[in-house]
Image (spheres, coloured by chain):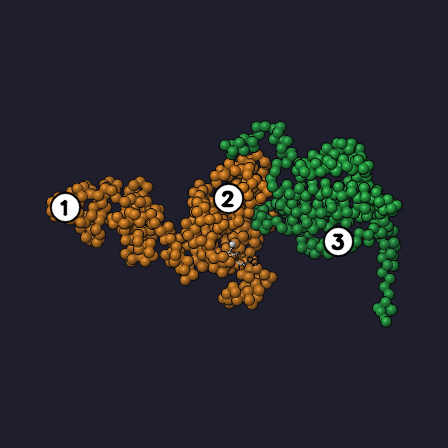
């Protein structure tokens, strides 16, 4: 049998190798190193903070947030889950993972929301961005671990960079979608009153897209959590490392404990961010408004409300 | 007087080759033919008009006739393909984006068919939107927004959200938002089209009431001829992107320019379009204290073929006498004193009373007195004139006595 390989053989692996090794790495290494700096700074700060924060204070804080945003059920779950994590001896790893996740999501939002807004405003940008997102979402994450290691080395920060690349698409997609879906007559109204593009974005498009953007943020967060174990392959720590080393040493107990920790953290963060998105649409007073109305009695606003009720 | 808004030969053609559509229009092709041949949609073709300050200019037409497109060219939401739109010195069609924004912030605002309120802002914040965009501070902004809401009767709902209000109330907020920046020109694209008929009537009355105070220049779009006739100082009938007739309510109902307009006008409520002045005639009267008043009255009635006559005393309406009673009294009793047979309970209306409020008075059979503001007799309406005007078949006699010259003469009489 004859096959195309008998005629021509394409050394694709060599090409990629030489592109990365001989071109990208020597020429751009300083640039890639510099990119790490802000991530290192944010991560270092968050990691130090969460490890410094006493377990009880953190638990109380997160339970309160869960109660305010997602209701009593989620609050009780948060309380029990965090206590459980502490009891199985994974508190410190959980804090490391949490700071990694927050850092990744923060950078995803910082890159993804502006990019999403930009692609919503220009069809040409979307035309370029969309196929890139498709590729990002179809390439298995293992594939880009190698170039990342070559460019950034191993450790926490390269792990986070891999996570950012993996978790970025939904926030861009949903920001774009949210802004494009704002009702046309509202855009027209904003324009008819003489809004600039920024005023339009800030006053109308962004607030109305917020719900969709929050849904994107939630998806990004979940994707980031799913990268925790894979990131451990290239030297990231935390719960992922517990699972990874557990697997490596066939220590089923440790791997399971780490896995449960990740799942619990995921549920808590999912519930809280999901209800954050929903809350914005129904006008419940924010915590800030509630506090303000508790301490600032007799404001003009209150009188009007009283008058209306009467 | 210089018009507030001047529209000159505006065209809007949707598509990439407007010149092809223009060529088609020159050859008198229809909108559909042009679309089939060139793929261009004619939205608006060759529309020109002036609107004077304080006037309500209504554009009426069926769905798809280009009303929304036209009104959106006026504030540049849709840039016209050709033509000029002059607001004071600025040509909205060709000025810079910066300038256009300034015009929108200061001179011209819009009320939308489906309200287009911002759902994430309170009623007061919605009303204050234009002020916020202009950069006004929070305190004066809220004060002005509340004042605007006060005008439409919604100040109590300032801190509610739009979705908590009914449709009619939402459109009041839309109106308040349009008025809050105190613009000179207000564009209204079928503002009451989404409301149910009862609320619509209420809103129409309220708009007229507000307009008496505010005297804005209003461009009002509607597909409802009755609404157009009620609100419009001037009305343009639009068809296939073109104005087929522009005129006052009476002009359009009395002289429809073509079959298209005539078909519209056919089933409107004429009683609301025409008012008392439209069918009034110059009064023929006798003075109460005059010598030989009774004989004179009888002579006049015979001469003008009337069976009743108004009697005045020092410019006031004293009452009326009927031929029958006067003749009987004069013949049988030999008396010639008018006051004996004077009917003092006479139907009296003012010049702007709509015809549909004259049915009652007209069916009594007596001529109706039209009084001016000071109670003097400005005109007389024969009962049959009311009915023939309402039915749309005016007798020659009525037409000849209600033309402009007569109305003008009656007015001059008033001023003396
Ligand atoms: N953006 C657009 N692109 C193409 N055609 C349009 C567009 N907007 C309106 N049209 C066409 O222009 C004509 C007038 O529409 P419109 O102004 O909305 O009418 P109306 O408000 O009187 O119902 C219609 O034939 C419509 O299909
Ligand atoms: Mg329309």
Q: Chain of mark 1?
A: B
The quarter of the image holding the N terminus of chain A is bottom right
Instruction: Give the SS element for disc 2.
Output: loop
CB contact under 8 Å: marks 3 and 2: no
Q: How many tags in the picture?
A: 3
- Tell me where residue A94 appears, x and y as whole percent: 79, 39
Q: CA distance from mark 3 to mark 1?
A: 107 Å
Colour displayed for chain B in the image of the structure: orange
Where's residue B191, x and y in %? 49, 49
Rendered image: mark on residue B166: 2
Relative to residue A153, is residue B70 drawn left or right? left
Question: In x, y percent, where is residue B104?
Answer: 56, 46
SS of the residue at dot 3?
helix
Chain of the residue displaying label 3? A
Report the Cα–Cα distance between label 3 and label 2: 45 Å
Of residues B87 and A292, which is closer to you in this image? Answer: A292
Q: Quadrant of residue B287?
A: top left
Mark drawn on residue A137: 3
Are marks 2 and 1 in one subunit?
yes
Which residue does the numbered mark 1 point to in the structure image?
B329
Please say whether residue B8 is visible from this viewpoint: no
């Amino acid at each position: 049998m004859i096959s195309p390989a008998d005629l021509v053989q394409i050394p694709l692996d060599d090409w990629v190798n030489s592109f990365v090794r001989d071109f990208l790495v020597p020429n751009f290494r300083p640039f890639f190193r510099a990119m790490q700096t802000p991530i290192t700074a944010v991560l270092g700060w968050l990691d130090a903070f969460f490890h410094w924060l006493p377990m009880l204070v953190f638990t109380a804080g997160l339970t309160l947030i869960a109660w305010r945003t997602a209701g009593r059920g989620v609050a009780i779950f948060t309380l029990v889950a965090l206590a459980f994590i502490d009891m199985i001896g994974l508190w410190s790893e959980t804090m490391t993972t949490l700071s990694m996740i927050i850092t990744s999501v923060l950078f995803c939002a910082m890159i993804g929301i502006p990019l999403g807004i930009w692609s919503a405003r220009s069809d040409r940008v979307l035309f370029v961005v969309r196929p890139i997102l498709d590729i990002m979402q179809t390439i298995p994450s293992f594939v880009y671990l190698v170039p990342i290691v070559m460019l950034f080395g191993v450790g926490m920060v390269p792990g986070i960079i891999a996570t950012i690349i993996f978790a970025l698409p939904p926030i861009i997609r949903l920001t774009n979608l949210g802004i494009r879906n704002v009702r046309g007559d509202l855009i027209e109204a904003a324009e008819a009153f003489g809004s600039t593009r920024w005023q339009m974005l800030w006053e109308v498009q962004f607030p109305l897209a917020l719900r969709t953007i929050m849904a994107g943020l939630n998806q990004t967060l979940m994707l980031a959590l799913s990268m925790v174990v894979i990131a451990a392959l290239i030297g990231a720590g935390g719960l992922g490392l517990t699972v990874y080393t557990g697997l490596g040493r066939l220590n089923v107990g440790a791997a399971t404990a780490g896995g449960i920790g990740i799942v619990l953290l995921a549920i808590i963060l999912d519930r809280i961010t999901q209800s954050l998105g929903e809350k914005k649409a129904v006008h419940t007073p924010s915590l800030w408004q509630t506090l303000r109305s508790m301490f600032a009695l007799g404001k003009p606003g209150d009188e009007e409300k009283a008058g209306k009720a009467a | 007087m210089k018009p507030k808004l001047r529209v000159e030969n505006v065209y809007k053609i949707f598509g990439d080759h407007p010149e092809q559509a223009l060529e088609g229009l020159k050859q008198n092709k229809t909108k559909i033919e042009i679309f089939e041949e060139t793929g261009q949609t004619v939205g608006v073709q060759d529309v020109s008009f002036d609107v004077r300050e304080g006037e309500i200019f209504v554009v009426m037409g069926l769905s798809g006739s280009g009303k929304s497109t036209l009104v959106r060219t006026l504030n540049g939401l849709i840039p016209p393909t050709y033509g000029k739109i002059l607001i004071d010195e600025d040509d909205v069609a060709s000025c810079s984006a910066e300038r256009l924004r300034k015009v929108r912030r200061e001179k011209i605002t819009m009320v939308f068919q489906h309200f287009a309120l911002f759902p994430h802002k309170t009623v007061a914040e919605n009303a204050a939107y234009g002020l916020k965009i202009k950069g006004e501070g929070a305190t004066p902004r809220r004060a002005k927004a509340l004042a605007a809401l006060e005008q439409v009767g919604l100040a109590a709902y300032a801190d509610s959200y739009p979705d908590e209000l009914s449709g009619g109330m939402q459109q009041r907020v839309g109106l308040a938002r349009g008025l809050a920046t105190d613009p000179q020109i207000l564009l209204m694209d079928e503002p009451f089209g989404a409301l149910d008929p009862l609320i619509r009537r209420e809103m129409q009355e309220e708009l007229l009431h507000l307009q008496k105070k505010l005297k804005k220049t209003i461009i009002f779009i509607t597909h409802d001829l009755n609404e157009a006739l009620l609100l419009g100082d001037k009305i343009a009938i639009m068809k296939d992107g073109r104005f087929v007739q522009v005129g006052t309510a009476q002009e359009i109902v009395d002289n429809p320019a073509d079959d298209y307009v005539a078909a519209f006008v056919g089933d409107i409520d004429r009683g609301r379009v025409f008012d008392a002045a439209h069918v009034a005639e110059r009064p023929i009267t006798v003075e109460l204290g005059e010598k030989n008043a009774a004989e004179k009255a009888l002579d006049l009635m015979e001469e003008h073929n009337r069976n009743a006559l108004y009697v005045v005393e020092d410019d006031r309406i004293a009452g009326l006498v009927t031929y029958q009673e006067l003749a009987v009294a004069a013949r049988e009793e030999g008396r010639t004193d008018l006051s004996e047979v004077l009917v003092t309970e006479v139907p009296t209306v003012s010049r702007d009373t709509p015809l549909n409020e004259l049915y009652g008075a007209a069916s009594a059979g007596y001529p109706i007195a039209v009084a001016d503001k000071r109670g003097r007799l400005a005109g007389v309406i024969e009962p049959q004139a009311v009915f023939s005007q309402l039915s749309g078949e005016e007798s020659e006699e009525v037409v000849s006595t209600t033309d402009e010259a007569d109305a003008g003469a009656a007015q001059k009489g008033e001023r003396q």
